[in-house]
Amino acid sequence: MERKIIFYGKYFFRFYEKQDVKTKRKIDFVIDIIRNVERVPIKFLKFLEGTYGIYEIRVLISLKSIGIFCFFDEGQLVILINCYIKKTRKIPKKELELAKKLKQQYYEGKRL
């Protein structure tokens, strides 16, 4: 089983480019799990209640934790949108609002 992963907008890549090699490897590792594992553990991928289908990819590194927002389209297609460094257990409202906006833009673009 392999999910197709695409990146919507430039938010993910702007974030990714700023990370050190160790962090990039860990992000790549977690994305590979999501791409290839049928039942991804909640440790790596969590559905966010009340967000109309937005998930948080969790990347845990010794000194920091990273959240990457994503959603599914057409079953096995995963769309990665924006990312942030987690400073607390709460998700920053600004980042979540951006994720909702990007998801809406994605679907509006598909209708054209």
Image (cartoon, rainbow, N blue to C red):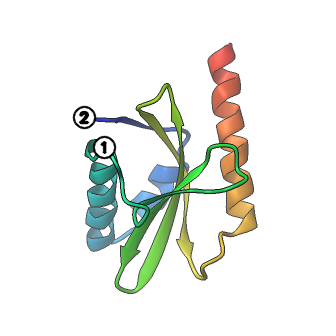
- The answer to which of 72 and 23 lies nearer the viewer is 72
Q: Quadrant of residue 78?
A: top left
Q: Residue furthest top?
A: 112
Q: Is residue 46 above or below residue 39?
A: below
Disc 1 packing (10 Å; few <14; some 14–19; many ≥20): few
x%, y% of residue 83? 54, 59
Mark with earlier residue (1, 2): 2
On the rendered structure, is 109 left or right of 27?
right
- The answer to which of 107 and 51 lies nearer the viewer is 51
Location of mark 1 (residue): 38
On the rendered structure, is 36 left or right of 60?
left
Gap between marks 1 and 2 measured at Cα: 7 Å
Q: In the rendered structure, which amino acid carries the disc numbered 2?
A: Met
Residue sitting at x 40%, y 86%: 63
Identify the secondary structure beneath mark 1: loop
Identify the secondary structure beneath mark 2: loop
| Discs 1, 2 touching: Cβ within 8 Å | yes
Q: Is residue 59 above or below residue 56?
A: below
x%, y% of residue 76? 41, 32
Q: Quadrant of residue 18?
A: bottom left
Q: Is residue 9 above or below residue 106?
A: below
Q: Quadrant of residue 28?
A: bottom left
Disc 2 packing (10 Å; few <14; some 14–19; many ≥20): few
Residue sitting at x 58%, y 81%: 87
x%, y% of residue 94? 74, 63
Q: In the rendered structure, which amino acid carries the disc numbered 1?
A: Glu
* Disc marking residue 1: 2
